[in-house]
Image: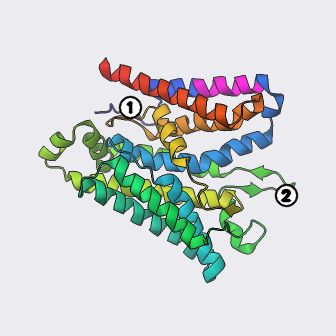
Amino acid sequence: MAKKKPFGKLNGREAMVVGIIILMIILFSLLSPTFRTYSTFVSVLDMAYYIALMAIGVTFPLITGGVDLSIGTGLICYSLFGGYLIVHKDMPVVVALLACMVLSIIIGTLNGFLIAFMELPPFLATLCTCMITRGLGSLLSGGFGVSWPSALEEAGWFRKIFRFTSANGRVIPIGIVVVVVLVLLMNFILNHTKVGRYTIAIGSNKEATRLSGVNVKFYHVFAYVISGFFAGLAAIAYSATYVTIYPGSGAGFELDAIGGAIVGGVSASGGVGTIVGAFLGVIVITLMKVGLPFIGLQANWQQIFTGLVLIGAVLIDVVKKKK
């Protein structure tokens, strides 16, 4: 079982990831002066919002020894659903935001039910819901992109939660405050509440946890409900950041979130991990995706380097478990 640490202090793995982030910023800044701009900083945070929110949620299934592959296509599905209600049903933005959250919780509950009660392998169960959400999103949008109200419209108030434009036209990425607060809150829940302790216990030894009298099925389902809930929040962040949402554009988002969590120290085999670590890992992944093009490495190289970083993170986890 994961060791508790004093609230607000970094463990060894988290400190190492912070060091990697600092080195990456220095490296990209030295190799590309254009990287050292305010617009690049905003781009990193814009991408980090929705990936970090997905990573917060998916950390819980990962710690149970499972995975949630539906969060990426789910994010797009929920965004399209909310946009569809606004554009085609003339619903208020508040109703659309709530609809995003309700649908995301339903999908998360379905994942948990399939895994905890039907005993489907997490990979297979969430792969199926990944396909369902991808198809559902396309059906709702008719195969076309959906636009939420812009920041210039009165109904676009929700965008100011993540991006605020000052009087001189500069974009202020205030959403990072929202994300950091959620990271600290969920880190506290994971380390200091019954939900978190039982989530870690299930990943450490599911049978022993069951024999100790814990309702394993309930807490197993709840881990996927949390994942779905944060995928819904990520959908809102994505809708607030980008003008138009297109069907099929969420493929690979789940890999960025899961990869970030693993880089930050969440064990792929369960039982170990922190929300702070997952968030820091997402910053590493996001810096790579934004920074590598500045030094002339395009999409294919980005994928290669991301894969190599994940291999290194998994190897560190394997070595620690052997010790």
Per the rendered image, the range of residues in magenta is 20-29
Residue shown at 23% from the left, 54% from the top: 217
Q: Quick check: is 155 in the magenta stretch?
A: no
Query: Counting other residues with Cα less than 10 Å from the Cα at mark 2, is it few (<14), some (14-19), or many (20 or more)?
Result: few
Residue shown at 35% from the left, 62% from the top: 110
Disc 2 versus disc 1: distance between alpha carbons?
A: 43 Å
Tell me the chief SS of the magenta region.
Answer: helix
Judged left or right of residue 152, residue 89 is: left
Task: Say if 139 sits above or below 68 in the image.
Answer: below
Q: Quick check: is 22 in the magenta stretch?
A: yes
Residue shown at 56% from the left, 39% from the top: 282
Task: Say if 320 sits above or below 6 in the image.
Answer: above
Identify the mark at residue 167; answer none if there is no mark: 2
Q: Amino acid at mark 1?
A: Lys
Q: Position of residue 24 (x, y in %)?
A: 66, 26
Task: Say if 12 sits above or below 242 in the image.
Answer: above
Q: Quadrant of the C terminus?
A: top left
Rendering colour mode: rainbow
Identify the mark at residue 64; answer none if there is no mark: none
| CB within 8 Å, label 2 to label 1 | no
Residue shown at 39% from the left, 53% from the top: 126
Q: Which residue is mark 1?
A: 5
Helix or strand or loop: what does disc 1 sit on?
Answer: loop
Q: Position of residue 305 (x, y in %)?
A: 60, 28
Helix or strand or loop: what does disc 2 sit on?
Answer: loop
Task: Say if 304 sits above or below 127 in the image.
Answer: above
Residue at the extreme top: 323
Q: Is residue 36 visible?
A: no
